[in-house]
Image (tube, helix red, strand yellow):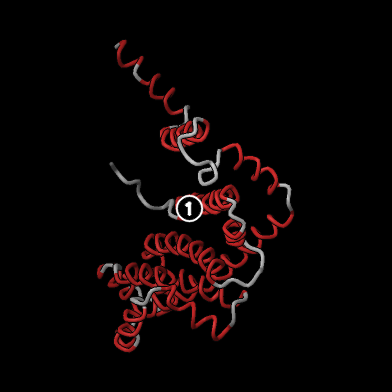
């Protein structure tokens, strides 16, 4: 009896403490970085000390140009993401429900998705220039392909039994789409959205690197650091880019948990 009454205490106590294991490797790398630069194991002109990066970060965080760049990059990312995911869901549903569309469009789509995304940049630059339009279109392309594939997989995964129930109840095509197909495909669509969000952010920074037009943006911070041979500025830019990407990933995880609360919990 005493054993069973005492066992819940350590478990409840463990649940109150956050899991700090993901921080072990980053902290170890920072300590190694600090030791390597302070003891002269590396050339500090190439591998700058962490204190230098912190000083640069402090300066940039009080620079309005930095926040303008963050806002511009986020605007390009979210605009392209909205276009790419909307088009991807529409095409994925069309390919999933229409054999004719799969026959007409499917081969062309699967051929074009084999082309590297960055191979489209010269064509976009030639047609639309190096401004925001070409960058947003490139971001939309980055989000489009994973969204189509995930939606197509979800739509084709609707069971025949569910489709038969919809037929028995006399669902119209619109009712079948919105009451059966899309709810059933929602887990795959949200998984595709998570990938699309990652690819869109990568596409945003890649477009700012390769479609250089002297406009502000997070990618320009790294370019400015490279031009001035300032490794501290490059590292600061990479840290901010990674931090925003991590924030997007956490946001989509929370969104998925809220929207798919109806799913039974996964047993491990």
Query: Residue at point 32% right, 46% down?
Result: 266
Residue at the spot of label 1: 249
Place of residue 97 in the rendered image (x, y in percent of width and height, measured from the top left): 34, 79
Q: Residue furthest top?
A: 2
The reply to whether residue 36 is in sight is yes
- Residue 92, placed above or below residue 44: below
Which element is circle 1 on? helix
Query: Residue at point 47% right, 74% down?
Result: 141
Name the residue nearer the viewer: 188 or 113: 113
Q: Which quadrant of the figure contains the N terminus?
A: top left
Name the residue nearer the viewer: 196 or 69: 69
Query: Residue at point 46% right, 60% down?
Result: 198
* 217 sits left or right of 186 in the view: right
The reply to whether residue 176 is in sight is no
Q: Which quarter of the picture shows residue 218?
A: bottom right
Name the residue nearer the viewer: 23 or 179: 23
Place of residue 246 in the rendered image (x, y in percent of width and height, measured from the top left): 50, 50
Q: Which quarter of the picture shows residue 73?
A: bottom right
* 74 sits left or right of 169 in the view: right
Place of residue 123 in the rendered image (x, y in percent of width and height, measured from the top left): 49, 83
Name the residue nearer the viewer: 66 or 35: 35
Query: Residue at point 25% right, 70% down?
Result: 160
Place of residue 234 in the rendered image (x, y in percent of width and height, measured from the top left): 56, 52
- Residue 84, placed above or below residue 109: above
Number of callouts? 1
Q: Which quadrant of the figure contains the C terminus?
A: top left
């Amino acid at each position: 009896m005493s054993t069973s009454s005492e066992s819940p205490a350590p478990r409840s106590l463990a649940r109150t403490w956050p899991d700090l294991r993901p921080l072990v490797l980053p902290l170890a790398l920072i300590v190694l970085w600090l030791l390597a630069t302070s003891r002269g194991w590396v050339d500090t002109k190439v591998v700058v000390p962490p204190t230098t990066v912190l000083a640069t970060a402090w300066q940039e965080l009080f620079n309005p140009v930095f926040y303008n760049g963050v806002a511009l990059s986020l605007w390009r990312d979210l605009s392209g993401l909205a276009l790419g995911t909307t088009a991807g869901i529409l095409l994925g549903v069309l390919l999933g429900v229409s054999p004719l569309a799969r026959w007409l469009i499917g081969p062309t789509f699967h051929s074009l998705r084999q082309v590297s995304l960055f191979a489209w940049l010269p064509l976009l630059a030639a047609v639309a220039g190096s401004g925001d339009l070409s960058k947003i279109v490139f971001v939309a392309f980055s989000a489009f392909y994973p969204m189509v594939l995930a939606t197509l997989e979800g739509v084709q995964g609707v069971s025949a039994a569910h489709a038969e129930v919809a037929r028995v109840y006399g669902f119209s095509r619109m009712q079948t789409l919105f009451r059966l197909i899309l709810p059933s495909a929602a887990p795959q669509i949200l998984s595709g959205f998570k990938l699309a969000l990652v690819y869109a952010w990568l596409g945003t920074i890649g477009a700012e690197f390769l479609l250089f037009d002297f406009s502000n943006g997070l990618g320009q911070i790294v370019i400015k650091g490279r031009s001035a041979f300032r490794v501290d500025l490059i590292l600061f830019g990479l840290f901010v880019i990674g931090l925003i990407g991590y924030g997007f990933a956490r946001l989509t995880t929370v969104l998925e948990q809220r929207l798919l609360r109806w799913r039974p919990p996964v047993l491990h």
